[in-house]
Amino acid sequence: MSSLVAQFDSLRALVLRQALSFESLRRIFISRSQRLLLSFVLAGAINFFLALFFPIWVILIGPLIFGLPHLFSGARFIPKLLFEGSEKKGIYACGFLVLTSGIFHLISPGGPGGWDLGVMALLGSYFLIKRLSLIPILFFSSVLVGTWTYPLLTLGLLALGHNFVAFAYWYKSGQNENEKFTALICFGLFILASLFFFTPIALRMSEWFATIPTPDGVSLLPFILGKQIFPAASNPDFLFSIMSAFAFGQSMHYFVWLKAVPEQTISQSVPLSFRQSARSLSKDFGFWGVTLIIALCALPFLGMIFLRLETLRNLYISFATTHGYIELAGLPFLFNSKKS
């Protein structure tokens, strides 16, 4: 493993030597805020195009490549942003909840339900005990009341809103005003791009998608997939927009957890090398934890040989659901009080 990491570092060094020979690129590279802004714009442009014309492909393929790594990234960094002194316990607790809830969903499939709300209530209760205040109480009360009275609408809002929540963690991870401002700019761009999918122009442009074949063996139609994301909706055009907006949001959600937040939480201004990243992972998860993470992240690629993409996506959702509730449970405490 160490030799493979060393080879990646050698390739990285070669690419950087060529790219940083340009003064403008060197200035951007050594500035974390500028580097992340440029990376976000480039990733956003690519993912916007893909979500507009290939939304089903994005929703199916994206989780298989980035889904599991982003779950472990969330389990790793959410505790670091919420606590000081007990990050290790939080990392293990979040990882345990993601894994056990995923197993629970595999045993008892059926999508988000009481188990996920129970996880959120459990985390919320723990946080409230440590930091009793009005904002978290109102937040959790609204979610629980909405789920009880308007379950389908609340589920759709949570599914879409989950992609926006990650930007709050990005903002919180900023180490100075420039970095926090960059997070706000990127959040604004993300909102504008997401709203564009609901315009008549976007619908006309995405009509071209009807001529693109879906993956072999996939029975998901735009209307059906849109209903899965936002069950309370019924208008076909709105559901198509929901599907495209969700595809874009999913991709940029991965960017935040796999690129922005990890870079914001390190002390140095330039990205870690592969060797440094491996040491940092081992520090947080331990040798066997890293080994387990690598093995789990490789499973979707092996699964492509034996299972349909649609089946693999459903399996991934089993593990991803609780990650969303962990993000939501921590959200009202990011800015409500000091770390404890």
Image (cartoon, helix red, strand yellow):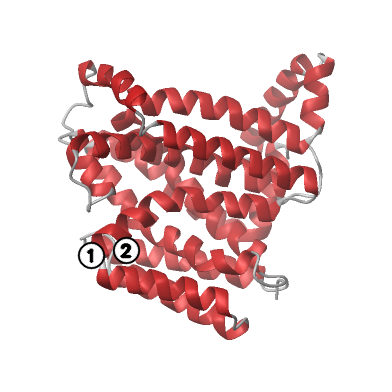
Image vertical order of residue 282 relative to residue 50, above or below: below
Give x and y (percent) for residue 13.
75, 24
Kindly indicate the quadrant of the structure image that contains residue 282.
bottom right
Q: Amino acid at mark 2?
A: Ile
Image vertical order of residue 339 relative to residue 170, above or below: below
* Picture residue at 36% right of the left edge, 73% below the top: 144
Q: CA distance from mark 1 to mark 2?
A: 6 Å
Image vertical order of residue 295 relative to residue 94, above or below: above
Most foreground residue, 92 or 173: 173
* Picture residue at 23% right of the left edge, 41% below the top: 225
Quarter of the figure with the N terminus: top right
Kindly indicate the quadrant of the structure image that contains residue 223.
top left
**60 relative position to 266: left or right:** left
Most foreground residue, 88 or 215: 215
Give x and y (percent) for residue 47.
46, 28
Mark 1 crowd level (few <14, some 14–19, many ≥20, 10 Å Cα)? few
Q: Is residue 64 visible?
A: no
* Picture residue at 39% right of the left edge, 41% below the top: 63
**Tag 1 secondary structure:** helix
* Picture residue at 60% right of the left edge, 28% below the top: 41
Give x and y (percent) for residue 272.
73, 40
Residue that label 1 marks: 107
Give x and y (percent) for residue 233.
22, 48
Mark 2 crowd level (few <14, some 14–19, many ≥20, 10 Å Cα)? some
Quarter of the figure with the C terminus: bottom right
The numbered disc on residue 25 is: none
**Tag 2 secondary structure:** helix
Disc 1 to disc 2: CB gap under 8 Å: yes
Residue that label 2 marks: 103
